[in-house]
Image: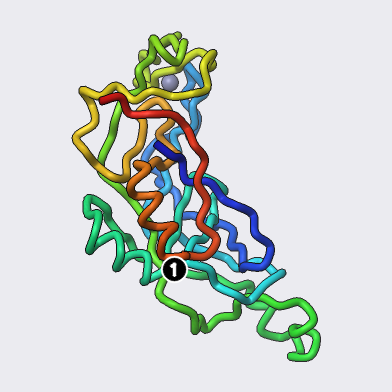
Amino acid sequence: MYQFVAPRDRRFAWASRRGTWSRDHIPRVCPECGASRKRRVSPLVLEWLPGSGLVPDFCWPGFNDEVVVSQRVRELLNGEIGGTRFLPIQMWQNPRLGLLKRPRARLMPRVWLPYEGPPLWDLQTDAWCDLDLDHAGVLLAHRCSICGTDHYTALTNDRLLVDPSTWRGEALFRLRQYPTLLYCTEQAKSLLEARGFTNAGFHLAGEIPE
Ligand SMILES: [Zn+2]
């Protein structure tokens, strides 16, 4: 299994996440364990950064914990993989940028609004699996009595094994122990790589045992 990771290819446009965050929880930080109680809610809001005007098939506005994909990727995943959801995104541009003179703007390429690139989507999956905690050497150190967050000890074996009883064959999934990261099977990675999608990145994270 592979983790989706940003390859940091500077040929392509990079966006930051302005995020919209839930304000359901006051205070924002759990008073017992200090865990952030903010949750990013849809829609994801992108702000394009200067450097490149070339929109890739994979964008990484939250480093490795947000995966934004192009319409081409959506069509492949819908057709051949399934089990994925595609949420709309919005974009924001500092209004002062609109006042810049065009020649100066061309010196520092970027994606400009109004956006004219391919449709982009916030890639999500509803599939959740558990790590094989014994194999990972990870222990549940503390379950917070207020917010319910599980706090684990650090990995002692960084080659992850998924607990196979919690995996139902999904091509894309998340791990409850690392809830912000997105993982996929080798088959899904191969399919995505075979299409030559730009700016895709995968890190061999471990295995799903038979
Ligand atoms: Zn807590």
Q: Is residue 185 left or right of residue 142?
A: left
| SS under mark 1 | strand
Q: State which quadrant residue 176 falls in.
A: top left
Relative to 39, residue 209 above or below = above
Residue 22 or 181: which is nearer the viewer? 181
x then y, percent, for residue 186: 37, 43
Q: Is residue 163 left or right of residue 102?
A: left
Q: State which quadrant residue 89 falls in.
A: bottom left
Residue marked by disc 1:
90
Q: Which residue sits at x=67%, y=67%?
A: 11
x then y, percent, for residue 158: 52, 22
The C terminus lies in quadrant: top left
The N terminus lies in quadrant: top left
- Colour logic: rainbow
Relative to 97, residue 65 above or below = above
Relative to 178, residue 182 above or below = below
x then y, percent, for residue 81: 25, 54
